[in-house]
Image (tube, helix red, strand yellow):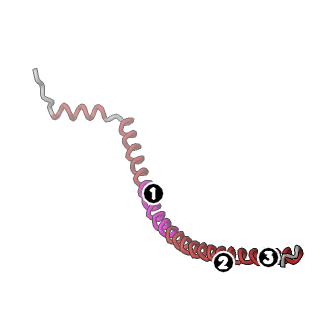
Amino acid sequence: MNRQANPKESDMAAAAMADPFLESRVARLESDVAAIRSSIDEIKVDIRGLRTDVSDVRGEVHKLETSLRGEIADLAHKLTRDSAYTRIWMLLQSAALLGIMARAFKWL
């Protein structure tokens, strides 16, 4: 025997289930959901602010990288030049020492 629910019966069942504890719990859940939504909105605003800050930092890092690359290239050039000067100086010292030794041993 199939019985279909009478609309009046379903209204009475809903009224019976609607006790004050259930209503207070639903109200509490609704307020919690509202608080969560407001927190999410604040987080979204914070993330937007962080995006702009991150893009600013990226720009500054790019500028620093460019300037550091230039400075490193200058230092590499100076190092190469100083290395050449050191080689020339060592060659001249060796020639002077050989000249002194040649005179001392009467090779010349």
- The answer to which of marks 3 and 2 sits earlier in the sequence is 2
Q: Which residue is drawn at 41% across and 58% down?
A: 41
Mark 2 = which residue?
A: 81
Task: Tell me the magenta residue range.
Answer: 38-57
Task: Check the image and name the residue furthest to the left.
Answer: 1
Residue 49 falls inside the magenta stretch: yes
- The answer to which of marks 3 and 1 sits earlier in the sequence is 1
Looking at the rendered structure, the kind of residue marked 2 is Arg
| Category of crowding for the residue at label 1, using alpha-carbon neighbours closer than 10 angstroms: few (below 14), some (14–19), many (at least 20) | few
Looking at the rendered structure, the kind of residue marked 1 is Ile
76 or 82, nearer to the observer? 82
Seen in the picture, residue 70 relative to 23 is either above or below; the reply is below
In this rendering, would 83 be left or right of 20?
Answer: right
Q: Position of residue 104 (x, y in %)?
A: 89, 75
Q: Nearer the viewer, mark 3 or mark 2?
A: 3
- Say the numbered circle drawn on residue 43: 1
Q: Name the quarter where the C terminus is drawn.
A: bottom right
- What is the secondary structure assignment of the residue under circle 3? helix
Mark 3 = which residue?
A: 93
Q: Residue at x 40, y 53 (%)?
A: 37
Seen in the picture, residue 102 relative to 29 is either above or below; the reply is below
| Category of crowding for the residue at label 3, using alpha-carbon neighbours closer than 10 angstroms: few (below 14), some (14–19), many (at least 20) | few
In this rendering, would 73 be left or right of 40?
Answer: right
Seen in the picture, residue 96 relative to 20 is either above or below; the reply is below
Looking at the rendered structure, the kind of residue marked 3 is Gln
Task: Check the image and name the residue furthest to the front.
Answer: 107
Q: Name the quarter where the N terminus is drawn.
A: top left
Q: Where is residue 29 in the image (x, y as percent from the top left)?
A: 39, 43
Helix, strand or loop: magenta stretch: helix
- What is the secondary structure assignment of the residue under circle 2? helix
Whether residues under marks 3 and 1 lie with C-beta atoms below 8 angstroms apart, the answer is no
- The answer to which of marks 1 and 2 sits earlier in the sequence is 1
